[in-house]
Amino acid sequence: MASSSYFSGVLQLADVNDFITPSQECIKPLKVDKTVKISKIRYENDGSFSSAIDQNTVEVKKVEISLNDCLACSGCVTSAETVLIAQQSYLELYKIIEENRKQTEPEKKKVVVVSVSPQSRASLAVRFNVTAQQIMKRLSGFLQRIGVDYVLDTTLGREFSLIESCTEFVERYRRKEFDSKALPMLASACPGWICYAEKVNGSFILPHISTTKSPQQVMGTLVKHYLGRVLSRTPDQIYHVTVMPCYDKKLEASRSDFYDDVYKTRDVDCVITTGEVLEMIEKEGIQLLSEENCLQNLSFLGDEEELWSHEGGGSGGYLHHIARFAVKSLFGQDLKNLEYKTLRNQDFQELVIEIDGLPALRFAIAYGFRNIQNVVQKIKRGKLPYDYVEIMACPSGCLNGGGQLRSFDDENAKELLERVKDTYNAVATREPWKNPIVEELYETWLGGHNSETVKKLLHTKYHEVEKLQTTLTKW
């Protein structure tokens, strides 16, 4: 199976597919000095290029197309990005670890941090037939043994993301009367959906997308800026890796919005999938995973070792938390039970909240390309009845991401997914506001919940990508 097939369906269908026409080939093959006058560029017999400047011939350097260049082009997605995405590989992690081993000056070694997503740990736990808590401890020991300094849980990043999403929804609801783009608010945690929205839907849909960063990118901010400060290290002295259930997360980490121009580094340097972690374990020797090490400051502060999760499903529980927070903030009532109604299919469900017998808020879950298309088309026609939609590119959500471990032996995919869900749901839950560490960081690091620092570090922007006009678009 081609590696491109692991990307979410949203990135392989419609206008952002795996096909490159001749007119859509990358258009940066040469690096030309525009400060001097060039009469012509010549193609040499050996395949190189040269430019004629006055009477002199100068060799022209080829330009390597970066992942950023590719993301700025609407011509293709998965083919070119799959080739360019080599830097988002566990081999890069090994490369950094090896460089650290060779470095004789301790202050020049990079601090290597790996942040593990709840979905990935659930998938690995099922494969090794252990609990989520056990796999996190064993994975921590394994990674530290090969040279990783800190192994963290991305749940902390998700708590910030949930809180900010809830606050943002209430703010949008209150300005809906004079801002036609305030609602519906659409989830922003899925990079496959974001890429599709930017490249296919453009300006009419982007204002509706929540500006809150995904848990991965919030974690990147926490690691590079907060943990860096605690360790007296600059962002470029930290190498941050995330373990994610989805290949699309590699594209998210490569966005220019998450690049620090001052220190020339990304908030997340490398993304590896759950499957790639299994490859690492097999490469090193599976017996390494049997050695349990204590978790190292999963929360940055204190010695909390117990894992926590959130209610609302395996994709982060955004709708669940926003619904409860909104009802309390806007209507002063506590929402006890959330009763979802399945509509077109299991991946399209709605939640209608009534106040005094009348519908007050409408929410929906839309997973998978078909349901996303339906939502987008209804927004375009002004007929979407919902105030908020939790959108994820993968059918069944993040627990079924393309980077998760696939079934083996005689177990079918559906049975495996159910086991992963059970393992994920077995972790104790709490509301993100009840984590004292989160509140402490809001006050001591971010300067309060509504500060400019919060807007700068925990929120982002989206960019419409102009579609390429090709001969095939006229067919």
Image: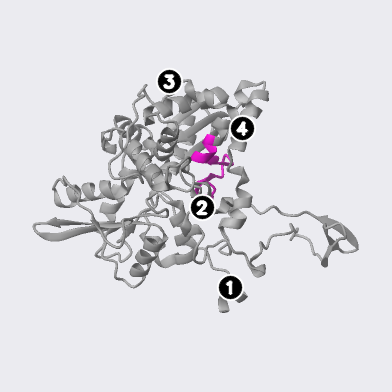
Q: Find disc 1 in the rendering and name its residue.
A: 469
Secondary structure of residue under mark 4: helix
Check residue 261 for magenta coloring. yes
- Real-space CA distance between mark 4 and mark 3, rounded to the nearest whole angstrom: 22 Å
- Sooner in the amino-acid sequence: mark 4 or mark 1: 4
| Residue carrying label 3 | 294
Which label was assigned to residue 94?
4
Q: Which residue is mark 2?
A: 7
Helix, strand, or loop for circle 3?
loop
Point out the tag, 2 or 3, that comes first from the N-terminus.
2
- Is there CB contact under 8 Å for labels 1 and 3? no
Q: Neighbour class for label 4 at 10 Å: few (<14), some, many (≥20)?
A: some
Closer-to-camera residue (49/11): 11
Q: Tell me which residue sits at (26%, 46%) in the image.
A: 321
Amino acid at pointer 2: Phe
Q: Quadrant of the C terminus?
A: bottom right
Q: Is residue 311 left or right of residue 212?
A: left
Q: Position of residue 55 (x, y in %)?
A: 91, 63
Asked which quadrant contains residue 386, the reply is bottom left
Residue at horizontal 50 percent and vertical 58 percent from the top? 11
- Magenta residues (range): 252-278
Give residue 239's quadrant in the image: top right
